[in-house]
Amino acid sequence: MSDNCSRREFFANALKLAAVAAIPVGALKILEPGEAKAAIAKTGVRWGFVVDTYKCIGCGFCVKACKNENEVQYDAPVSRTWVERYVIKKDGEMLADTPNAARDGFTTSKIHGQAVPDSEISKAFFVPKLCNQCDNPPCAQVCPVGATYQAPDGVVLVDRTWCIGCGYCIMACPYGVRFFHPKYKVAEKCNFCYHRISKGMKTACVDACPTGARMIGNLKDPNDPVTKIVLNERVGVLKDEYGTKPQVFYLGLDKNVR
Amino acid sequence: MVETAASAIHGAEWTIKELFVYPNEFIYWSIQIVMYPLMTGLVAGAFVLSSLYHVFKQDDLKDIAKFSLIFSFALLFAAPMPLMFHLQQPQRGIQVFFTPHFTSAISAFGIVFFTYYIIVACEIWFVYREYVVKQIKALEGKDGFGNSLLRAIYRVFSLGVHDISEQALHRDHKAVTILAGIGIPVACFLHGYAGFIFGSVKANALWMTPLMPVIFIMSAIVSGIALCILTYIIIMEWQKHRAKSSRKAWGMSAEELGGAEVDVIRKTSKYLVGFMIAAITLELLDLVFRGYTSLKSWDILRSVIYGKDFVNIFILQYTLGNLVPFLMLVLPGLSVRRTAIATMLVLLGVFMMRYNVVIGGQAFSLTFAGYMHYHLPIVPHSMDTYKEGLLGALTIAVMPFVLFYWINKALPTLKYK
């Protein structure tokens, strides 16, 4: 430092140096042209799902496949996907259950230990559930650190390295699809098997379903079978009233379904 | 094998499911989330009580103002602790400050909390500056480790400002008024926003109401004033006891102390009653409105409110926690003992209100066709059952009193001349 550097100048320069040093190196990452384009361009993919409740037989293969694929402990009572059984009696009473998330299917006709005679049943059916990958996801809205976010293709993801485990997203989801992962102790949910669909594969549950009750596809592709069903058939979504804009569409949705 | 996997699920330990409940539903927000709004409520309430004197010149609150300010500070340190106990990844809690996601109500926590913290700390500095400077002079040259340590603390506290001329003290006074004035809305925001965290959860039929922040603010002030009165009574009784057994406490006889005490609590309890009326009115309005509009969720809410949680809501919260202490406080001839019992009941009422909101909001399933029952872990057998059990809650409850004890050593809150 030269002699003619005044104290004032010295402090001013030191401040500038500190300011420059404060910029994190990560913020200066240079993107490849392809990466930059992908970061700003709208993607041509919007993942969506169709569940045909008429086809579901309640075998629970989807639940089993999901647990194995996504390392959710096999014996834990939580699951990224599950199947519900609804029994509507002739007097209008609704009974429903999902024993152990229907991992082993439905092995008894008793519901909550209660036997219902066939003569009293007016209708009965199964409804598979999974994350709705909402267009207006309340879980992503309430995450205080941005660990849950929506990918450009619509799938809502969780960053396991960033989640603080406050559980606000679990509280915010009207569908109860979220839980704390037993091993990682962070928020966990169905992500349409993101590691598979991004490689051109189907989700584990779609592959495991013996009746084709589950379908995944790109809603932005008008020729995709899923898109065709959503556009041409009479489909319903779960809990429309919350304004979450769910992207899992159901064929044969009954008013009793919760 | 089944047991180990099940017990690894957070919430499975204390949740009993009944009828149709989604598989992933458990009581995820348990006792610590009851403690969190309770603590921030006490912080806000204690601060508002002290500000009533500093800003609105309610001279009848002069004696309790300093005390409630320091108590608010002690509570403020303990307030974020329930969240640390609750987080599954507490070591990452700091990320709320560094990478806040501003669409989340929780993300404002860092900003609101630190703003408030700075305001309270500054106010304490101005309020105690004169005392501290005098102490530095008084302790000069005195022997003993305790004295020199205390003097060192005071010297740091004074930040080198030793001017206690009339002019300087006048400026201090002005600064306190301004800080207390800013502090009131910030304290209300600190707690109102805790209410917003619950009130904005659209998935929860019990929590979702725009009244929630206001209800939280009112009950916060109620709880804060009640705790300040109660702690004040305990301290005064202790001093009276000392005055009786030995010579004099603070240079006053037991009778003189007793007279001052009754005077303070009678005046303070008037404010308590006022805020209680506001809080109960809002809570009842919410209940009536839910019943009258009877939306889809009302069937299950009614079965919880009037059925499963009846004792918690109508006996413990409204009757024992609101009605009984209200009558005790408004009936003529208010005594110290009656006030002490009434404030304890008020605190029970506010605790039960938090409990019934947080736990009651998870007592029914998102299916509206099933229930979840909460069993508070009493004897811990794992970190989870300690942190989110009775012992964890007690740890949090004791914390502010321990802090207050130590802060009070250096900055005495109740000194009569």
Image: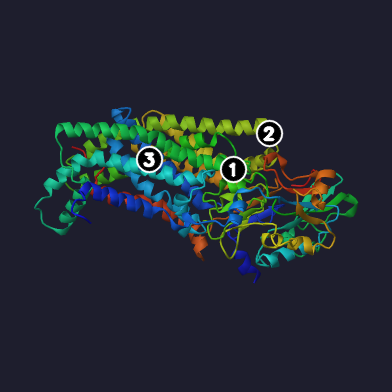
x 68%, y 67%: residue: A74
Which circle's residue, 2 or 1, is located before the other in the chain?
1
**Alpha carbon separation for disc pair 2 and 1:** 19 Å
x 16%, y 46%: residue: B135
**Alpha carbon separation for disc pair 3 and 2:** 40 Å
- The answer to whether A32 appears left or right of B85 in the picture is right
Where residue A256 sits in the image (x, y, percent)?
Answer: 79, 45
Q: How would you rate the neighbour count of disc 2 (Cα within 10 Å): few for under 14, some for 14-19, many for 20 or more?
A: few
For disc 3, the marked residue is: B340
Which amino acid, by three-letter code, is at mark 2?
Ser
Q: How would you rate the neighbour count of disc 1 (Cα within 10 Å): few for under 14, some for 14-19, many for 20 or more?
A: many
Which amino acid, by three-letter code, is at mark 1?
Val
Between B12 and B329, the one lying in front of the other is B12
Which amino acid, by three-letter code, is at mark 3?
Ala
* Discs 2 and 1 share one subunit: yes
Query: Is residue B227 visible in this depiction of the protein?
Result: yes
For disc 2, the marked residue is: B294
Where residue A232 sits in the image (x, y, percent)?
Answer: 85, 44
Between A237 and A25, the one lying in front of the other is A25
- Image coloring type: rainbow
